[in-house]
């Protein structure tokens, strides 16, 4: 049965999504949108927000303000009538994070949040999407087999009206569908505009969300790829199988689904059988099931980004110097000189469309789960296939330190 609760799905999920949630079979079929065509099964303007359930939202907001250079813009909590949760909204360009924690659980959604943090640790609970017509998107998604969590409804105050609805995806993750075209206030009704926690840096560290990666159980990757194809009309943009993502000890498989404009990209990973435990196995064990593994953030100056974030205490994966010995032979010239890439441990990759520069943080909480990628694109729409071996060997070294390889 569809949940018809009316609480704000962008800060406090109302009804737990069962960890065993599967795409619902349906006889309805969908034709995915081809890139560059006008017909769109499930129109999406882009990512609206990445919503985190955390143990202490106040401290998390400070971390993302200082270490990621984000600007706090809105708040919801006891001071403006929300007695159960505290939520902080942070932005950097078009990227928006919502950080929510429970103050005292008194309702089902508060108890769900408290349980979610206890079982999973800090993690992403909602990949919310900005859509032009929430009702049409929701009804179409359900007709094609999605599980509805929150029916379309309006929330209003003196600054206008926002239309919201939510559908389930893998694990306890959801997609909240948002139309804020009729609203000019601070994030959503129930939020108050607030000043930044710290004085924002003169230059942003990043400008947008590039892609969001989900980890699912062995054998379920294709199931969720099909879900996005059938329900949302996303196309299979890339896939990496077999030896594409494998080292001597571990392996995984990945397929990337994207909407027709490529503004929204969701790589989906599953573990592959290998000699030792893969990074996906480790994530699933410590997160307690499927969920969002990492968020890639787009920057137009990765050197500035890495230097600024390192100075603020962010830890990045280490890459051996040997990686750079032959890098220039197959990547060629890039905006950043090879010596500077080596100094900062930034990875580079080139394909038929151009090149990209990327770097990955270590997990940003005590559990080896959620981490971030910083990516600077120059034509390439890939995901760093040429770096997979070096990257996953670096991850394996961290796993070994934790005793989880």
Image (tube, rainbow, N blue to C red):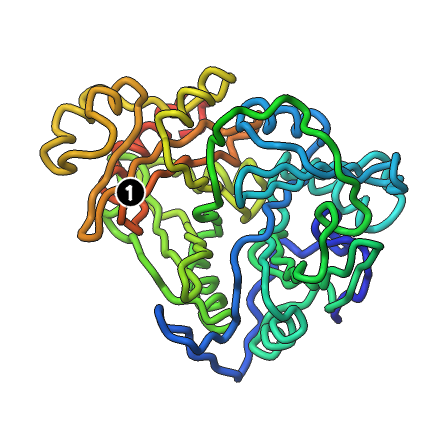
Residue for point 18% across, 25% down: 324
- Residue 345, x across and y down, in percent: 30, 23
**Which of 339 and 270 lies nearest the eye of the viewer?**
339
Instruction: Name the residue furthest bottom.
Output: 27
- Residue 85, x across and y down, in percent: 81, 39
* Residue at the disc numbered 1: 384
Circle 1 packing at 10 Å, graded few (<14), some (14-19), many (20+), is some
Residue for point 32% across, 38% down: 250
- Residue 130, x across and y down, in percent: 59, 59
Instruction: Name the residue furthest left.
Output: 329
Residue for point 67% across, 59% down: 180
Horizontal side of 80 relative to 127 (left or right) equals: right
**Which of 58 and 25 lies nearest the eye of the viewer?**
58
Q: Is residue 338 above or below residue 222?
A: above
Res 307 quadrant in image = top left
Horizontal side of 172 relative to 331 (left or right) equals: right
Horizontal side of 9 relative to 398 (left or right) equals: right
Q: How many marks?
A: 1
Residue for point 47% across, 74% down: 40
- Does dot 1 land on a helix, a strand or a loop? loop
Q: Quarter of the image containing the N terminus? A: bottom right
Res 116 quadrant in image = top right
- Residue 114, x across and y down, in percent: 76, 39
Q: Quarter of the image containing the C terminus? A: top left
């Amino acid at each position: 049965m569809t949940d018809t609760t009316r609480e704000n799905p962008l800060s406090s999920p109302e009804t737990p999504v069962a960890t065993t949630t599967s795409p619902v079979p349906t006889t309805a079929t969908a034709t995915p949108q081809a890139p560059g065509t006008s017909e769109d099964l499930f129109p999406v303007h882009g990512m609206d927000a990445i919503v985190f359930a955390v143990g202490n939202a106040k401290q998390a907001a400070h971390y993302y303000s200082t270490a990621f250079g984000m600007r706090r813009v809105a708040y919801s909590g006891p001071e403006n009538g929300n007695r159960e949760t505290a939520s902080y909204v942070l932005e950097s360009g078009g990227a928006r994070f919502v950080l929510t924690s429970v103050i005292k659980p008194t309702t089902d959604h508060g108890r769900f949040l408290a349980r979610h943090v206890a079982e999973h640790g800090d993690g992403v609970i909602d990949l919310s999407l900005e859509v032009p017509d929430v009702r049409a998107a929701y009804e179409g998604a359900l007709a094609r087999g999605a599980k509805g969590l929150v029916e379309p409804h309006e929330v209003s105050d003196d600054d206008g009206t926002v239309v919201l609805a939510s559908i389930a995806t893998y694990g306890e993750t959801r997609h909240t569908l948002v139309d804020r075209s009729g609203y000019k206030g601070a994030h959503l009704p129930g939020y108050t505009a607030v000043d930044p926690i710290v004085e924002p840096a003169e230059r942003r560290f990043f400008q947008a969300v590039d892609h969001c990666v989900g980890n699912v159980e062995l054998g379920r990757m294709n199931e969720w790829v099909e879900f996005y194809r059938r329900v949302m009309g996303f196309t299979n943009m890339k896939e990496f199988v077999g030896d594409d993502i494998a080292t001597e000890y571990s392996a995984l498989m990945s397929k990337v689904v994207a909407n027709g404009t490529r503004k929204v990209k969701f790589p989906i990973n599953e573990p592959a059988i290998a000699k030792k435990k893969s990074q996906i196995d480790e994530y699933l064990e410590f997160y307690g099931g499927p969920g969002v593994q990492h968020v890639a953030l787009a920057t137009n100056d990765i050197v500035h980004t890495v230097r600024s974030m390192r100075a603020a205490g962010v830890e990045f994966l280490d890459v051996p110097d040997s990686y750079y010995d032959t890098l220039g032979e197959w990547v060629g010239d890039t905006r950043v000189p090879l010596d500077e890439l080596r100094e900062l441990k930034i990875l580079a990759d080139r394909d038929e469309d151009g090149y990209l520069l990327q770097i990955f943080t270590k997990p940003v909480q005590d559990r080896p789960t959620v981490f971030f990628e910083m990516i600077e694109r120059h034509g390439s729409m890939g995901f760093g296939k040429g770096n997979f071996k070096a990257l996953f060997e670096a991850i394996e070294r961290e796993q070994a330190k934790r005793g989880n390889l």
